[in-house]
Image: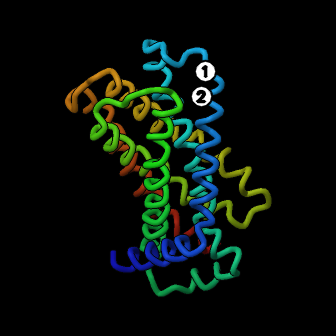
Amino acid sequence: MFKSLNICLKDLQSEFRSKKKLNSMIIFSLLVVLIFSISFGNFIGKSSFIDSLVPGVLWVSFTFVSTIAIFQSFSDEIENGCINALKLCPAQWNAIYTGKILSTLTLLYLVQLFIIPIFALMFNYSFQGIFLLAVVVLVGTSGIVSVGVLLAAITMNTRSGELLLPVLLFPLIVPVIIPSVLATGKIISGSTFVDILDELRLLVVYVIMFYTTSRLLFEWTIQD
């Protein structure tokens, strides 16, 4: 676990010095929310429509931003020619995988803290049950990143990897997106923790399944 944290801290220190990923993710997320707010501008203020629209739009925004963060999870190693050094790292492969997940999740959570209030402002919307929403966002995003980091390792040395990653990622994360959207919709409508337990259980199962499977496959992927 300490080796995973060291890898995570190394990535975060590098990012906070350059802010390259954070800046691109924040700008992209702002553009996505702006486009959606313009597209559905005629419906803003109509609470019944917005209540059904917000969960899907919010998670589409999260998914797009997650794709950027995931694809760039190995960008430093590739740009600096350090990918072979990473392969020679004395840490176990699962420690490298977990460290990459932790650093990617940290950046995503920071961007999501930015997206949600901007989203509320653009759509003139007030989120209810912010604590429950945070739980769903934390678990759902973990599921996306768990499988995404593995796919980033697969596509990082391929031609047009930035195009291939979403093609592979989006179908695999559908089981995470659906319960996340359903749980978010229930929270917005005023449901309690008990009401979203089914969706949360499903999310936790998928996160565990994705993490366990990807962790087992990561060594084979990175060595090839």
* Tag shown at residue 121: none
Q: Which residue appears at 48% of the width and 16% of the height?
A: 45
Q: Which residue appears at 60% of the width and 21% of the height?
A: 40
Q: Nearer the viewer, residue 129 or 177?
A: 129
Category of crowding for the residue at label 2, using alpha-carbon neighbours closer than 10 angstroms: few (below 14), some (14–19), many (at least 20): some
Query: Which three-letter amino acid code belongs to the residue tagged 1?
Result: Gly
* Tag shown at residue 37: 2
- Is residue 56 placed above or below 165 in the rendered structure? above
Cα–Cα gap, marks 2 and 1: 5 Å
Q: Quadrant of the C terminus?
A: bottom right
Image quarter of residue 82 = bottom right
Q: Which residue appears at 28% of the width and 38% of the height?
A: 132
Q: Nearer the viewer, residue 175 or 34?
A: 34
Image quarter of residue 70 = bottom right
Q: Are marks 2 and 1 in contact (CB under 8 Å)?
A: yes
Q: Position of residue 157 (x, y in %)?
A: 72, 67
The secondary element bearing badge 2 is classed as helix
State the residue lying farthest toward the left.
194
Residue under pointer 1:
41
Q: Quadrant of the N terminus?
A: bottom left
State the residue lying farthest toward the right.
159
Q: Position of residue 123 (x, y in %)?
A: 51, 27
Asked whether, in this view, residue 62 is left or right of residue 39, the answer is: left
Q: Position of residue 140 (x, y in %)?
A: 41, 44
Q: Is residue 84 something one can see in this rendering?
A: yes
The secondary element bearing badge 1 is classed as helix
Query: Which three-letter amino acid code belongs to the residue tagged 2?
Result: Ser
Q: Which residue appears at 71% of the width and 55% of the height?
A: 162
Q: Position of residue 9 (x, y in %)?
A: 44, 75
Q: Is residue 221 something one can see in this rendering?
A: no
Asked whether, in this view, residue 109 is left or right of residue 128, the answer is: right
